Image (cartoon, rainbow, N blue to C red):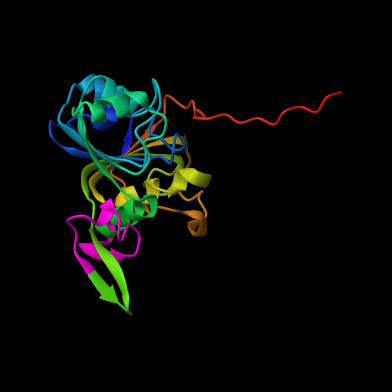
Amino acid sequence: MSKKLYASPGAALEGLLSDGMTIMSGGFGLSGNPESLIPEVKASGVSGLTVISNNAGADGFGLWMLLETRQIRKMIGSYIGENKLFERQYLDGDLELELNPQGTLAERIRAGGAGIPAFFTKTGVGTIVAEGKTVERFAGEDYVRETWLRADIALIKAWRADPAGNLMFRKTARNFNPVMATAAKITVVEVEEIVEAGSLDPDCIHTPGIYVDRIVQCTINEKRIENLTVRQRAAV
């Protein structure tokens, strides 16, 4: 049996969590959230966390759980959404927030995984996003300097994995999870399906196993929809 495979989400996180650490939490909206691992972070009782994530969950789901218990000290993200708990804690001064344009957040994480300490982008020039940051001109236009993001641990969710940790993602779950896997000291993956070694087409692997430290079969797989929009039926 692969040394990367763990029997439960709790076992997969054993010995890894500590107060004040930085956690990357995967997901795009509610798609690709590490649904099974986040409750284990809550149960551990660790506090003072800095969490890097595209979103902060929704009522009763995802990172909302860690906001409810006030285990998160700072959020680095790009989408607040309709999370009223997030909004209230920020406005009350109980939660520090570093808000990023969505593409900039993804690139900061990718840069962290690639070992690139800083890069320049036009996004945010002339706005509060650029306040306090270096702005330089390239080809006659202004660009703001952004710095990499790295974490102590990345908690991500994949569709399929083999025992070596090679991963495949589905659709929008691929937006943030693969780059987070490269940008943390330790990457823990919950996966919907664990397949036999050699059964994944090498051309279809999104994250090589070298970036993955621990794998666990997910125990929660709700895949909630944050805002359900349906078409009105035509009158008969």
Name of the residue lying farthest toward the left: 19
**First to last magenta residue range:** 113-135
Residue 8 seen anywhere in this rendered image of the structure: no
Rendered residue at 41%/34% (across/down): 81
Q: Residue at x 15, y 30 (%)?
A: 48
Q: Front-most of 99 and 185?
A: 99
Q: Quadrant of residue 32?
A: top left
Q: Is residue 114 magenta?
A: yes
Q: Which is more toward the observer, 37 or 150?
A: 150
- Relative horizontal placement of residue 17, taking residue 9 as reference (left or right): left
Whether residue 217 is situated above or below residue 170 in the rendered picture? above
Residue 54 picture location, percent across and down: 36, 42
Q: Give the quadrant of residue 162.
A: top left
**Residue 116: x %, y % from top left:** 23, 64
Question: Which image quarter holds the N terminus?
Answer: top left
Please say if 121 is above or below 186: below
Which residue is nearer to you in this view: 43 or 92?
92
Q: Is residue 121 magenta?
A: yes
